[in-house]
Amino acid sequence: VQSGKGMNTQSLKIKGVKDIIAVASGKGGVGKSTTAVNLAVSLANKCRLSVGLLDADVYGPSIPTMMKLQGKPEVSEANKMIPIENHGVKCMSMGSLVEKEAPIVWRGPMVMKALEQLTRGVDWGNLDVLVVDMPPGTGDAQISISQRLQLSGALIVSTPQDVALMDARRGVNMFSKVAVPILGIIENMSYFKCPHCNEPSFIFGKGGARKTAEDMGLRFVGEIPLVEEVRSGSDDGVPIVVSNPDSAVAKSYGDVAQSI
Ligand code: ADP
């Protein structure tokens, strides 16, 4: 883990935004963006907060698809981008600014410039909470974001298998180095319930994230099973907490939102 020493740590505090919460993972593909989306919508709809969602995963922005964001942001008179709102959440993503399949090939400094635009260059209005979908991993970009955005806390997403948990530990340690409190660990894809016999299969192992949380003295905030409707909700741009708010999974997301 790097210390972040010597990096530009100038604060990017955003006017009108009370709390900034990162949703992070050590590894890609564990469901970080899916978690960020369902939590952001739950915070808005269930906890009745005013919520923004910043897609800081600039190399692989998936928020426009998962939140069904259409078009490009308008620009205000003060020359700030106006977030695109859907499902009750104000969203900003690099994916809304570039062509859909265009590769984003920037080096580090460009990434920080882009993130600056996506935070301070945006008219967020008054927000209770801004949820940040972090880029996966523990590199320069993650450390700079953590320091410059003055995060109130970070939620770590992990799947239950050892390789993912190892990276989740790295994520926890990175946030500790930059003094960002860890809100807890959420386990995603905890099990798969057979639609025929209703028996759960622990495809990626059982209870790994809970144990890691206990070992590290962190809060275990909940588990989300592997459910087809979660995947289709992400692909269709209608998160399960919107399409099926009474489902067990939507309730779990709601509980996590209320607990953080
Ligand atoms: P990350 O942001 O960590 O790269 P994503 O949120 O993009 O991961 O998720 C990766 C894929 O897994 C997506 O296709 C998403 O729809 C799917 N997915 C995530 N969580 C679940 C879940 N609990 N059940 C089913 N599919 C899931």
Image: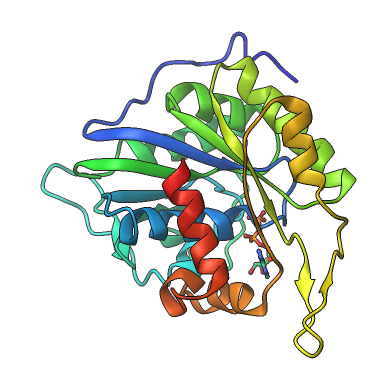
Q: Is residue 80 left or right of residue 29?
A: left
Task: Residue 211 in the image: state x and y as whole percent.
Answer: 79, 39
Q: How many marks?
A: 0
Most extreme residue toward the bottom is 196
> Would you say residue 82 is visible in this rendering?
yes
Q: Is residue 88 left or right of residue 260?
A: left
Q: Quadrant for the N terminus, please.
A: top right
Q: Quadrant of residue 141?
A: top right
Rendering colour mode: rainbow
Residue at horizontal 61 percent and vertical 50 percent from the top:
59
Q: x, y (%) of residue 183?
A: 54, 34
Residue furthest left as drawn: 77
Is 34 placed above or below 178 here?
A: below
* Residue drawn 69% across the image and 25% down it: 217
Residue 5 is situated, as x and y percent measured from the top left of the image, at 62, 9
Quarter of the image where ligand 1 sits: bottom right
Q: Is residue 136 left or right of residue 11?
A: right
Q: Residue furthest top?
A: 6
Residue depicted at 67% across the width and 13% down the height: 3
Query: Where residue 185 sits in the image (x, y, percent)?
Result: 65, 41
Whether residue 100 is visible: no
Residue found 71% across the figure and 69% down from its top: 226
Query: Image quadrant of residue 119?
Result: top left
